[in-house]
Amino acid sequence: MLSACFLGVAALFLGLSCWTLLETLAAVFARRIEPAYPSSSSARVAILVPAHNEEIEIAETLQTLTAQKRPQDQLIVIADNCTDRTAELARSMGVTVLERHDTLRRGKGYALDYGTTHLAADPPDVVIVVDADCQVQPGAIEQLVDTVMATGRPVQATYLLQKPPQATAKHSVAAFAFTLKNLVRPLGLTHLGLPCLLTGTGMAFPWAAIQAVSLASGHIVEDMKVSVDLTIAGFAPLYCPEARVTGVLPQNSRAGESQRTRWEHGHLQAITTFVPVLIKSAIQRRNLDALGVALELSVPPLSLYVMSWLAISAITLFWGWISGHWFPGMIAIAAGACLAGTVFGAWAKFGRDDLSLRDLITVPMYILWKIPVYLKFLVRPQKTWVRTERDVRSASE
């Protein structure tokens, strides 16, 4: 019975490892083909910027958006429960500001629902969501709009986090992990003809998709929830690698830990909550998109994945030594080989700027740093949205 149990767990790891390796190989070796979507210069676009106490970052974000805004477009900041100068700064830049005050219903989902309710009287063709601490690269808005108008589906831009000015090896590993999750794997899915997960910012929606789901949610990873809801509703998201949105990893270690705790606890909760729902939809409606999103969502955060693989490999190999049943251990080793292929393949093609060869030796320390995050999930999982503390900039910046 124990051998069967170990075999099942090892086989699960092998399946997920083969999946991530397939995505990575598709991204690394597939020929790059940029879709030639027709220009949608007449489309009416509303750009929503949900913001909670973002006076440090929001001016730079709005500058990158204003430069890409056309005369028929709307740029709207949703100042959500702000107690600083966010709304004042946005208005001084000529941006429409909606102020929302509701301390009981907190989180980006509620802010976005407030913004789309405002738009409902005269709905645009496309709604784009950009976080208040991100920079939208030139041309990204146009590329997102063209893709949405051509496909009629939600579209996710490439969202990457850059290292802060005084970066440590921990920042380098974190930036690479983000590249693997938000660039390599979605790019592989695109070449495989499959949908992707939304990543929270740089998201574009046709108005029909906005109407099909409810955004009013306090879920700590609202992007994953919306991805699931849209897929079930028939609007599985697509990836647009050409459109780029960037942010910066927190310099402060406490802020970084808070951010990762929210993301990774939310991801683990999403696996247990949403994967069964997606599988049910895939079976009942013969929805292959739902099956693809369920598989993608099932892959745990990279650090937890590596830690779990090490644990199951040690257990199954020890069991093989004492019982003579080596097959579970062999399956676990095969899973590790696929996982290693994923990491090194992604690093060789996409991660050299994030992570030097010297920094690779710090990966075990990064994994050790994440252990308390996962232990906290077992004892006291984070279930409510908590804003990541922003780095204070100098006056010269």
Image (spheres, grey):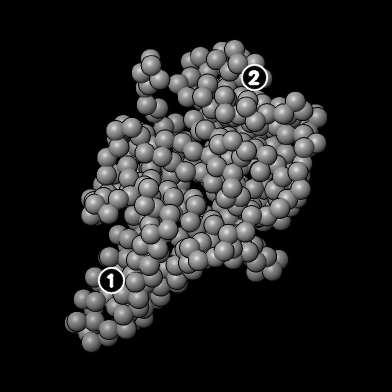
Q: Quadrant of the N terminus?
A: bottom left
Residue 223 lies left or right of residue 36; in this view the side is: left
User: For this view, does 165 lie left or right of residue 56?
Assistant: left
Which residue is nearer to you in this view: 264 or 375?
Answer: 264
Kind of residue at disc 1: Ser
Q: In the image, what residue occupies the spot 30% across and 69% down?
A: 312
| Residue found at x 41% / y 72% | 14
Residue in the picture at 23% in, 87% down: 324
User: Where residue 382 sits: x, y (%)?
Assistant: 41, 41
Label 1 element class: helix
- Residue 360 location, quadrant: bottom left
Crowd rating for badge 2 (residues with CA inside 10 Å; few <14, some 14–19, many 20+): some
Residue 115 visible in the displayed image:
no
Expressed as whole percent of the image width and height from the top left, the position of residue 175 reads 38, 45
Residue that mark 2 sits on: 95
Q: Is disc 2 placed on a helix, strand or loop? A: loop
Residue 213 lies, in percent from the top left, at: 69, 45
Q: Residues within 10 Å of mark 1 (few under 14, many from 20)?
A: many
Residue type beneath disc 2: Val
| Count of numbered circles on the image | 2
Q: Which residue is drawn at 53% across and 18% down?
A: 86
Give the quadrant of residue 395: top left
Q: Quadrant of the C terminus?
A: top left
**Horizontal placement of 3 versus 149: left or right?**
left
C-alpha distance separating marks 1 and 2: 55 Å
The mark lying in front, picked from 1 and 2, is 2
Residue at the disc numbered 1:
313
Q: Looking at this view, is 164 or 233 the one in front?
A: 164
| Residue found farthest to the left | 322
**Rendering coords of residue 347 (x, y %):** 38, 57
